[in-house]
Amino acid sequence: MAKSLHCNDVIPGCNYVVSAATEEEVMRQAAEHTRLEHNIRRITPEITAMMRAAIREEKSASAA
């Protein structure tokens, strides 16, 4: 099952959404987005925890 993260759940007002097969890939892409778009150069353990908590399981089309 795919995973997703809506940046708005961590940084209000941001419409970026990342989807990937694994939590690790979601985290990698979200960290890159955070650095590039929000100018947050150091991803602290607190930011990492907030990002991990915001990851959702995507429902498959057949399950919807």
Image (spheres, grey):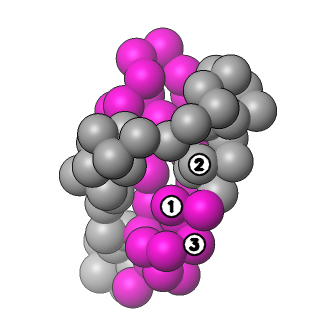
Between 46 and 3, which is closer to the camera in this rendering?
46
Q: Position of residue 25 (x, y in %)?
A: 57, 72
> Horizontal placement of 29 versus 45: left or right?
right
Q: Residue 51 bears which disc, if any? A: none
- Outermost residue, right side: 36
Which callout, 3 or 2, points to the residue nearer the camera? 2
Q: Which residues are magenta?
A: 1-28
Residue receiving disc 3: 25
Q: Is residue 36 magenta?
A: no
Q: CA distance from mark 3 to mark 2?
A: 10 Å
33 in relation to 38, above or below: below
Q: Is residue 6 among the parts visible in the rendering?
A: no
Which amino acid type is shown beneath numbered disc 1?
A: Met
Mark 3 closeness class: few <14, some 14–19, many ≥20 residues within 10 Å:
some
Asked if labels 1 and 2 touch by Cβ distance under 8 angstroms, the answer is yes
Mark 1 closeness class: few <14, some 14–19, many ≥20 residues within 10 Å:
many
Asked if labels 3 and 1 touch by Cβ distance under 8 angstroms, the answer is yes
Q: Quadrant of residue 14?
A: top right
Asked if labels 2 and 3 touch by Cβ distance under 8 angstroms, the answer is no
Which residue sits at x=48%, y=35%?
Answer: 7
Which residue sits at x=53%, y=64%?
Answer: 26
Q: Secondary structure at mark 2?
A: helix
Q: Position of residue 63 (x, y in %)?
A: 29, 81
> Horizontal placement of 10 versus 40: left or right?
left
